[in-house]
Image (cartoon, helix red, strand yellow):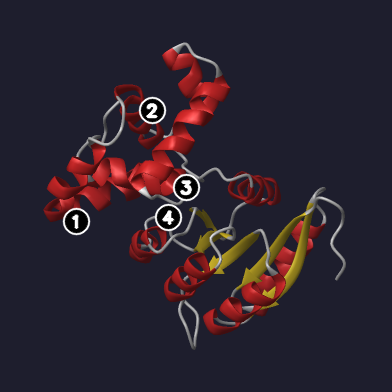
Amino acid sequence: MTSGAGAIRVLIADDQEMVRQGFTVLLNAQPGIEVVGQAVDGREAVAKAAELAPDVVLMDIRMPELGGIQATERITVAQPAVKVLVLTTFDLDEYVYDALRAGASGFLLKDASADKLAEAVRVVAGGDALLAPGITRRLIAEFSRLDGGRRSPLRRRVGDLTERETEVLALIAQGLSNAEIAVRLVVAEQTVKTHVGRILVKLGLRDRTQAAIFAYESGLVRPGAR
């Protein structure tokens, strides 16, 4: 399939043919998005991600041969530019925790509308994270509960950040966009983008999802904080 100029290239990995075909039809009908391949399991997803170099992989968690979590980790390690959007049937699927930690940029319910699906693809393709303030905040809060033992060493790494960068990190963890952070801090949005970039580099993080997880796991932000 020949990709349109500037189109977001998507690979769909799911062991159910109806899901793959349905998402392919929905996404190909959206302007600026093109499905360039499909994979029936995690092993094929890893191989096709290497072959096709998509911008975004829609990754089912439960698949034969190689599960979505392991496939996500292999793809994000080998191809940092490829973003993974995890597909799940349940909004509090326990495996989503592991998928986010493995490098996924967010997750989406399989019953999402065409518009929500397309918007999710655009969000992660643009380098942002899919941090819906409701469900995802509960997921990230679970990280802090499960990993209390890691808090002290992670908190020491927060010391590498400036005071303003620490403030921006806390707001990222609350699910605020760059524009919302700019309003909150009364600065230009470009300034916020600069801070976010420096935070990711200093902490060795992949994207905003990983930054939000770090903020909770380090104890910088507590579940339910505003």
Residue 113 x, y percent position in the rendering: 65, 50
Residue at the outermost bottom position? 65
Disc number at residue 168? 2
Picture layout, residue 156 above or below residue 182? below
Q: Secondary structure at mark 1?
A: helix
Q: CA distance from mark 3 to mark 1?
A: 21 Å
Q: Give me the C-alpha separation between circle 2 and circle 1.
A: 24 Å
Q: Nearer the viewer, mark 2 or mark 1?
A: 2
Name the spot of residue 83 as percent of width and height, x first. Answer: 57, 58
Q: Is residue 19 visible?
A: no
Quarter of the picture holding the C terminus = top left
Q: Circle 3 — which element?
A: loop
Q: Nearer the N terminus, badge 4 or badge 1?
A: 4
Q: Which mark is residue 207?
A: 3
In the rendered image, which quarter is residue 10 located in? bottom right
CA neighbours of label 3 inside 10 A, class few (<14), some (14 to 19), many (20+): many
x, y percentage for residue 134? 41, 39
Q: Look at the numbered discs 4 and 1 and tell me whether their residues touch, using CB distance below 8 Å.
A: no
Residue 91 disc label: 4
Amino acid type for the residue under numbered disc 3: Asp
Closer to the chain start, of discs 2 and 1, is 1
Q: Amino acid at mark 4?
A: Asp
> Residue 112 or 223: which is nearer the viewer?
223
Q: Of circles 3 and 1, which is in front?
A: 3
Mark 2: which amino acid? Val
Observer-side mark, 3 or 4, equals: 3
Label 1 sits on residue: 146
Q: Are marks 2 and 1 in contact (CB under 8 Å)?
A: no
Q: CA distance from mark 4 to mark 1?
A: 18 Å
